[in-house]
Image: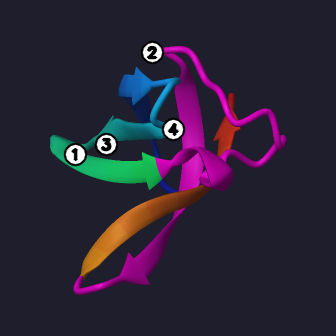
Amino acid sequence: MPSGVVTAFDDHVGLGEITSDGRVIAFQCIGIADGTRTIDVGAEVTFELLPKLGRYEATAITPT
């Protein structure tokens, strides 16, 4: 399972980014595994990649 750090998250919009091995992967708040729909910037996480509309999006995001 890939891991990375949340490098951006807009709580109001519900969109964020995870940086993992030098690449940036977008995510939506519904992809946060615990159902809270919010996560702190700087949180170390594991996640799964979901192919979506010709790109990958992070899902099943779990703080470590």
Query: Closer to the N terminus: mark 2 or mark 1?
Result: 1
Q: Is residue 60 above or below residue 11?
A: below
The local crowd at label 4, few if under 14, some if 14 to 19, many if 20 or more residues have their Cα within 10 Å, is some
Q: CA distance from mark 1 to mark 3?
A: 6 Å
Tell me the number on the disc at residue 41: 2
Q: Quadrant of residue 31?
A: bottom right
- Identity, as a three-letter code, of the amino acid under mark 1: Val
Q: CA distance from mark 2 to mark 1?
A: 14 Å
Q: CA distance from mark 3 to mark 4?
A: 20 Å
- Circles 2 and 1, Cβ within 8 Å, touching? The answer is no
Q: CA distance from mark 2 to mark 3?
A: 14 Å
Please give the range of residues in magenta.
28-54
Query: Circle 3 sits on which residue?
Result: 20
- Circles 1 and 4, Cβ within 8 Å, touching? The answer is no
Q: What residue lies at 48% left-to-right and 54% top-to-bottom?
A: 2
- Identity, as a three-letter code, of the amino acid under mark 4: Gly
Query: Closer to the N terminus: mark 2 or mark 3?
Result: 3
Count of numbered labels shown in the rendering: 4
Query: Circle 4 sits on which residue?
Result: 14
Q: Would you say residue 43 sits in the magenta stretch?
A: yes
- Circles 3 and 4, Cβ within 8 Å, touching? The answer is no
Q: Is residue 64 left or right of residue 41?
A: right
The local crowd at label 3, few if under 14, some if 14 to 19, many if 20 or more residues have their Cα within 10 Å, is some
Please, what secondary structure does the residue beneath circle 4 have? loop
